[in-house]
Amino acid sequence: RVDEALSRREARDLRRAFTLNDKFRFRRSLFGNNDSAFADTLNTIMAMHSIDEAEEYLYNDLGWNPEDEDVKDFVSIVRNHFAGIA
């Protein structure tokens, strides 16, 4: 169906999963207002093959605290991204 195909195509682009408010919030709280760092992180995650790989990157490489509420919300959006492309 057309709507399912559209949904799958949009799911591939993680950038579309974030609302405008999400973008402002996460750029401020997780990326120090650095738009480039936010965009680079999304591009890196979109190149990954699993949520496990993405979480390892976020928690280990970026050093994010998995207990932080902003991190939890960000990871939830990323998790939905991977569920949508599976």
Image: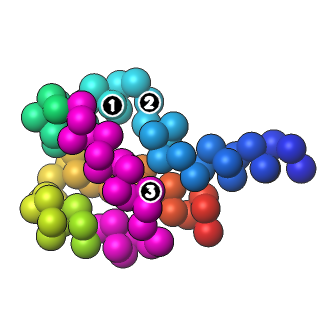
Range of the magenta residues?
Answer: 35-55
Label 3: which residue?
Answer: 46
Q: Is residue 77 magenta?
A: no
Q: Horizontal and vertical percent for residue 67?
A: 16, 60
Q: Main secondary structure of the magenta part?
A: helix
Q: Amino acid at mark 2?
A: Thr
* Image quadrant in which you'd find residue 37: top left
Q: Residue furthest right?
A: 1
Mark 3 vs mark 2: in front:
3
Q: Position of residue 28 (x, y in %)?
A: 16, 30
Query: Identity of the amino acid at label 3?
Result: Met
Element assignment for label 1: helix
Q: Residue at x 15, y 66 (%)?
A: 61
Residue at image mark 2: 19
* Secondary-structure class at tag 2: loop
Q: Residue 50 in magenta?
A: yes
* Mark 3 / mark 2, whichever is N-terminal: 2
Say whether residue 15 is visible: yes
- CB of mark 1 within 8 Å of CB of mark 2? yes
x and y, in percent, of residue 65 in the image? 12, 60
Q: What residue sits right under mark 1 in the picture?
A: 23
Which element type, helix, strand or loop, lies under badge 3?
A: helix
- Identify the residue shown where x is 23% and y is 61%: 58
Which amino acid does the dot numbered 1 rest on? Lys
Q: State which tag comes first along the sequence, 1 or 3.
A: 1
Q: Which residue does the image show at 15% across and 70% down from the upper left?
A: 60
